[in-house]
Amino acid sequence: MSAPPRRFGGIGALFFIASLGAIAFYVQKQEIPEERDLVRSSATVLSEERPQEEAIDALPWRDRLDLTAATLVPLGAPAAANPDAGPSDPDDPVEAAVDPKSSRMVQELADGHRILFTIDPVLQDTALQIFRSREVPYAAAVVLDLRDNSVLTFAGHSSMDSQVDPLEVLTTAWAPAASTFKLVTAAALLKNKRANGKTKECFSGGLHGLTDEMLTDNPARDTRCESLSSAIAHSHNLVMAKLALKHLDSQSLLDGAKALGFERDIPFELPLERSPAHIPAEPRERAKVAAGFWHVDMSPLHGATMASIFAREGVLQPPHLVAQVLAPDGSDQTPPLPNIERTLPKEAARGVGSMMVATTTEGTARKSFKDQNGVPYIANVKVAGKTGSLTGKKAPALNYNWFVGYAPADNPEIAFAVLLANEPKWKIKAHYVARRLVQVYLERREAIRDQSGARLTQDGGIMLPQSDASSAPVLAQATAEPETQPQPTPKPAPAKPAASDALPPVPGPVAEGTNPLPSQG
């Protein structure tokens, strides 16, 4: 079998695009002051030196893990006999006959190891078809099953630069976190009991940038007052900046960032870059970072993991992509799940989560979740989320557009992150993609729950065990506070929306496809 492509072989091209200039505006065309008009440094360059990690021998399959070599294997059928067969090809009549709704992704190694992935082929293909049909230059979508943070969707897309590996779009911190960092600020405020959802700040301006003068209270000028909850839903920059300026020092904000996965290694089967969060010591500069300006980058996989912390009421469980590893001798070599830990108080996580719901009901993502008459596209299910958007000033002036969140908001089952790098003329935003993925998940939730118990068999097949409680994924054991592990109770699937309100008005159809591989696109 040919060796899988190097994980970071083409990231230079992606970082070149991400480093073309300073960020020009934030959410509503906000501009960075001229003195900040500097070339962005690579997200891999951090100011601090890390201690040398102890060398750990790789498992006999781990260094050959390669999603592009996986194939679709129908449940109840033997796996592909040829380990060099490569990824599924929708133009191949045999591959095209495989139904993604009743199959799983399996990688066959030349030495006989077989790897079963956690990815749901239907959700995976939905994301990739949207990215292709909407002609997005760079895009990523990650969906996590909150029962154990297994990866249901791991879709990377790169059409602007052929040298960029789509998998790198998922696992590297190549895009600014933008307004999603407001969640960190809100969590830090609640954790330190310096504010609550009703805490208000009065302001004037702030849509096109933040200046030192705007950060100074002026009752004669600051005639508009909004709460912290409203600032999360509507992405009010000055409310977040002023609250951070008054109540958070640099250490408090940095601790809040680390609690949500920044500046730390998150265990994963594939190389996952740290998401850097450089918190300035100067108070006013720090306030601007707290509102979502510069100095913070994030990977899409980290974005979904951050959303899962709120959904799981403050508990971090690292994501995982491998459901099972079967050795040539038939022994099970599936690695144990990493330990979980509480990184945020339950009350703070719940408080921020409740603010995130208003983003989709009345805030910056409402147009993707409600039609023009205010009727929800997803009946009887609320979604918690946060938008984020920053645009580069210099050519090609890509817009980095985020949506992170979880659903259902009152009893979470999935967490997700969608990142698009759009050109100035764009067709969709990230919250539209996320809403479509939530819809597809809700239609497939029972099948996903049943198929999560699929296991490889020694005769080369893949089977579902008898339906019982033991077939469901189990949360990893906590190192502390085991009673805090949230275990959502499945709810009956809501009625499907009528065809007339299934999609918002966006150009072109969302075609169905059968290729589940994240590197195709």
Image (cartoon, rainbow, N blue to C red):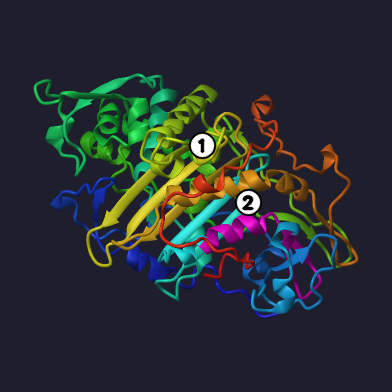
Spatial CA distance of label 1 from label 2 is 19 Å
Circle 1 — which element?
loop
Q: Which residue sits at x=79%, y=48%? A: 453
Q: Nearer the viewer, mark 1 or mark 2?
A: 1
Counting from the top left corner in percent of width and height, residue 307 is at: 51, 40
Quick check: can you spot residue 180?
no
Q: Splitting the image into 4 quarters, where does residue 226 fall? A: top left
Tell me the amino acid under the disc marked 1.
Val
Q: Which residue sits at x=61%, y=66%? A: 513
Counting from the top left corner in percent of width and height, residue 366 is at: 40, 39
Structural crowding at the residue carrying mark 1, measured as other residues with C-alpha within 10 Å and reported as few (<14), some (14–19) or many (≥20): many
Q: Which residues are magenta?
A: 103-129
Counting from the top left corner in percent of width and height, residue 392 is at: 27, 58
Pick the quarter of the image with the N terminus.
Answer: bottom right
Q: Which mark is residue 383?
A: 1
Q: Which residue is mark 2?
A: 151
